[in-house]
Amino acid sequence: MAVLETLAAHGGEARLTTLSETLGLNKSTLHGLLRTLLELGYISRREQNYTLGLRLREIAQPLQDADALIRTAFSPALRRLSAMSGETCWLAVPCGTREYLYIDAVEGGKNLRVASPRGKRERLTTSAIGRIFLAFNDDLLRALRKSDAVSSSLNGEISRIREQGFALDIGEAEEGLHCLALPLQQSGRVVAALGMAGPAARLHPDYMRRFAQRVLNEMFDIIKL
């Protein structure tokens, strides 16, 4: 998996020397791993470079289909939040037990807007969106607790998020940036999160709390399907 992720980080293609230096593996060990991945179709060879293989596209197709269904289901919520706030808004889904992935975004129309993070991954414990997933997914929270990644203050924040139904990030992930996140449900299960962000000067915490309650009331039918 580390080999595949390293290839992806280098644009899907890299030389043996680059892989060896990045992974900290000697070339003989790396040759054995690459040979296995080549035989299985997970990587290919292009002259002196190794590239990601087509087998990855085949096994990832069900995930792409699932993401497409989520984007379609919650596109009205994403666009409504953007229209209501004028800020950059996005849609995110869990990605493993430590990160989440942005799968869709709408950039805000105001000055000093936040750029779209589509396709980017972030850690669960360091943002409003990540805390939404921890607050409403016991399996994720349990996995992080086992690795001692959940502090007592984060535990308290998770309890508050469960009670109020939304999460705030007041300059924690990035100084001068305030974020709001809300859970998106299908059949009673949180499958994604809706987020928005903007400059601290524009998004005062009191305003964000009032705005979150307005969203929960006015968008109830499109954030809980």
Image: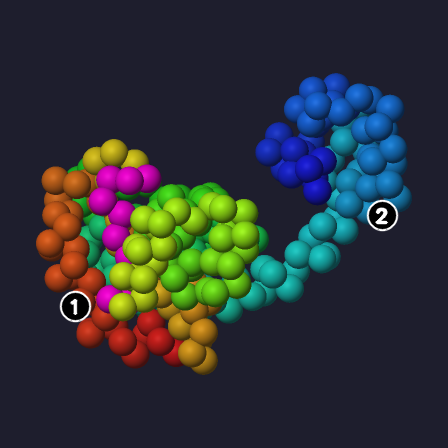
Between 18 and 152, which is closer to the camera in this rendering? 152
Q: Is residue 186 above or below residue 41?
A: below
Residue at figure coordinates x 24%, y 40% from the top left? 171
What amino acid type should be assigned to the residue bearing mark 1? Arg
The first of marks 2 and 1 along the sequence is 2
Answer few, some or many: residues within 10 Å of disc 2's Cα (few below 14, many 20 plus, some between 14 and 19): few
Which of the 4 quarters of the picture holds residue 188?
A: bottom left
Residue at figure coordinates x 65%, y 38% from the top left? 5
Q: Is residue 193 above or below residue 18?
A: below
Q: Which mark is residue 86?
A: none
Between 29 and 46, which is closer to the camera in this rendering? 29
Disc 1 is placed on an element classified as helix
Residue 171: in magenta span: yes
Report how far apart the C-alphas of labels 2 and 1 lie in the structure.
52 Å
Q: Position of residue 147 (x, y in %)?
A: 54, 47
Q: Confirm whether residue 195 shows in the render.
A: no
Q: Which mark is residue 40?
A: 2
Residue at figure coordinates x 70%, y 42% from the top left? 1
Between 107 and 193, which is closer to the camera in this rendering? 193
Disc 2 is placed on an element classified as helix
Residue 128: in magenta span: no
Q: Position of residue 32 (x, y in %)?
A: 87, 33
What amino acid type should be assigned to the residue bearing mark 2? Leu
Going by the image, does 197 lie left or right of 145?
Answer: left
Q: Position of residue 82 (x, y in %)?
A: 25, 58
Q: Confirm whether residue 185 shows in the render.
A: yes
Q: Closer to the camera: disc 2 or disc 1? A: 1
Residue position for label 1: 214
Q: Position of residue 42 (x, y in %)?
A: 77, 45
Magenta residue span = 164-173
Going by the image, does 102 lie left or right of 154?
Answer: right
Going by the image, does 105 lie left or right of 204?
Answer: right
